[in-house]
Amino acid sequence: MRIAVLSDVHGNCFALESALADMKETGFDHIVCNGDMIQGGPQPHETVQLLRGMNCSIVMGNSDAWLMTGIETDAHLISEERRQKLNIVREWSLSKLDEEDRAFIRSFQPTVTTDLGRGRKLLAFHGSPTSFDQFLLPSTPEDEFQETLKPYAENILTGGHMHLQFTRRLRDSRNFFFNPGSIGVAYNHEQSNDVGYFDPWAEYAVLTVEGMQLSLEFRRTPLDMEKMAQIYRHSDRPFADTAMDQYTRYE
């Protein structure tokens, strides 16, 4: 069994299409999405349409919950200037979604469980199993990380939210946690600039289960940045040039 695990598309349907083409080439049996699928990018409606055709399991992320409700659960982390811009983009995103699109987004679940056979399961979430806002990073203190995930350690665990590919072992367990990275907004957390440039690729992971053997592969699919720039700039998404500049100036 091969499970493709992806996260944080953020309305970048072009990046999702690129990753999906790579998934089909390498092969998979099922796709699990760890949340934040729609809000932010230039193609919210197109992303919904593609996801609906993929027949995948989808977790509710913080940005898509905010898109649907307008409730800011992480407002303390955002400056007033950025909040105003995000709200403008949110209103634009909503204007691109019809009622069927919105119903589809509302169907996203807090967690998703996939049966891997032989008594093993994959538990997917966004931030943590109890909060889509929680940060789990390679640098999260060990005791904090383990206490957060200890109640769920009978599963292989996967989360999103951090836009960063990494894995960590669960204490006193044969299992582990992994983050597949971001399809639409991959970036390096360790940068020497103040901008925070985005990486020119789509990231995802493939979990392969063969009997009692497990393997995890992190994949990066290069993106045609000229084509993506055209998509951004031909959309009427607010602040499209600013958003695209974070990709095109990356070195």
Image (cartoon, grey):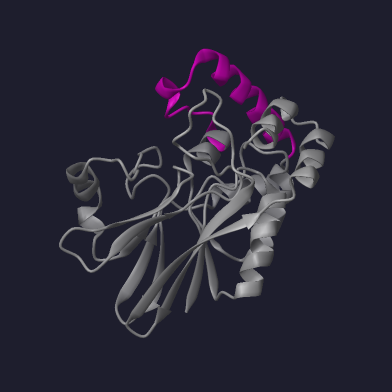
In this rendering, is residue 54 above or below 111?
below
Q: Is residue 87 magenta?
A: yes
On screen, residue 138 versus residue 3, left or right, reads left
Q: Quadrant of residue 97?
A: top right
In this rendering, is residue 166 above or below 77?
below
Q: Quadrant of the C terminus?
A: top right
Q: Could you say where residue 81 lies in the image, as x and y percent from the top left?
A: 56, 14
Residue furthest right in the image: 234
Q: Could you say where residue 142 lies in the image, as x and y percent from the top left?
A: 20, 45
Q: Is residue 70 magenta?
A: yes
Along the line of sight, which residue is nearer the eye, 72 or 9?
Answer: 9
Residue furthest top in the image: 80
The residue sitting at 20% across, 54% down in the picture is 150
Q: Could you say where residue 124 lies in the image, as x and y percent from the top left?
A: 41, 58
Q: Could you say where residue 238 lies in the image, as x and y percent from the top left?
A: 73, 26
In this rendering, is residue 49 above or below 28?
above
On screen, residue 204 versus residue 235, left or right, reads left
In this rendering, is residue 196 above or below 113?
above
Residue furthest bottom in the image: 211
Q: Which residues are magenta?
A: 68-96
The residue sitting at 54% across, 71% down in the picture is 30
Along the line of sight, which residue is nearer the eye, 64 or 248?
Answer: 248
On screen, residue 196 versus residue 232, left or right, reads left
